[in-house]
Image (cartoon, grey):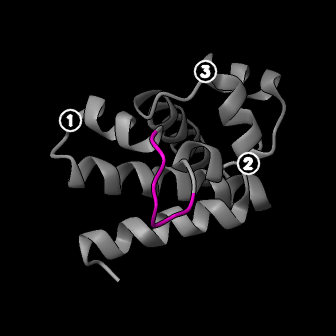
């Protein structure tokens, strides 16, 4: 149980950090994770939030997207955020808006994986 709680805390912290570096506010992160804004606020304060099912899956995708963008942009957060908030003709939309649905999250993650040549 303690190990699972630690893993959830790490995922919560990673998703908060990814959202921040991608230029997403807490309200946007709440929408992406499918949790209340109050839950994200508690996460930001270091309190435990139950990320199960869809919320956990979405958090993992968001972290994956951030890691891919970070690698592609050479660690330049400003470039990563600019890419994330700009229209992408290959994705037919703005990644920051697309990730608000599970389908968009997977499309953006798969696109970045292809760009990196990881899948």
Q: In terms of image quadrants, where is residue 118?
A: bottom left
Task: Find disc 1 in the rendering and name its residue.
Answer: 76
**Where residue 114 appears, x then y in whole percent?**
34, 76
Marks 3 and 1, how far apart at CA: 23 Å
Q: Give the magenta part as a residue range.
A: 86-92
**Where residue 53 appears, x then y in whole percent?**
78, 62
Residue at image position (55%, 59%) is: 61
Q: Is residue 87 magenta?
A: yes
Which numbered disc, 1 or 2, marks the residue closer to the eye? 1
Front in this rendered view, residue 47 or 95: 95
Q: Could you tell whether 105 is left or right of 23 in the image?
A: right
Q: Specify which label sits upstream in the sequence, 1 or 2.
A: 2
Disc 1 crowd, CA 10 A, few/some/many (<14, 14-19, 20+): few
Marks 1 and 2, how far apart at CA: 29 Å
Q: What element does badge 3 sit on?
A: helix
Task: Find disc 3 in the rendering and name its residue.
Answer: 44
Q: Specify which label sits upstream in the sequence, 2 or 3.
A: 3
- The tag on residue 51 is 2
Disc 3 crowd, CA 10 A, few/some/many (<14, 14-19, 20+): some
The furthest residue to the front: 89
Q: Specify which label sits upstream in the sequence, 3 or 1.
A: 3
Q: What element does badge 1 sit on?
A: loop
């Amino acid at each position: 149980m303690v190990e699972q709680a630690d893993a959830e805390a790490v995922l919560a912290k990673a998703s908060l950090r990814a959202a921040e570096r991608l230029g997403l506010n807490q309200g946007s992160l709440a929408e992406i994770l499918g949790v209340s804004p109050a839950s994200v606020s508690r996460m930001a304060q270091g309190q435990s939030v139950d990320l199960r099912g869809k919320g956990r899956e979405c958090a993992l995708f968001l972290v994956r997207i951030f890691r891919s963008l970070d690698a592609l942009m050479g660690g330049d957060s400003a470039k990563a955020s600019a890419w994330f908030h700009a229209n992408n003709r290959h994705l037919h939309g703005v990644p920051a808006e697309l990730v608000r649905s599970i389908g968009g999250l997977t499309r953006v993650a798969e696109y970045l994986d292809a760009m990196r040549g990881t899948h």
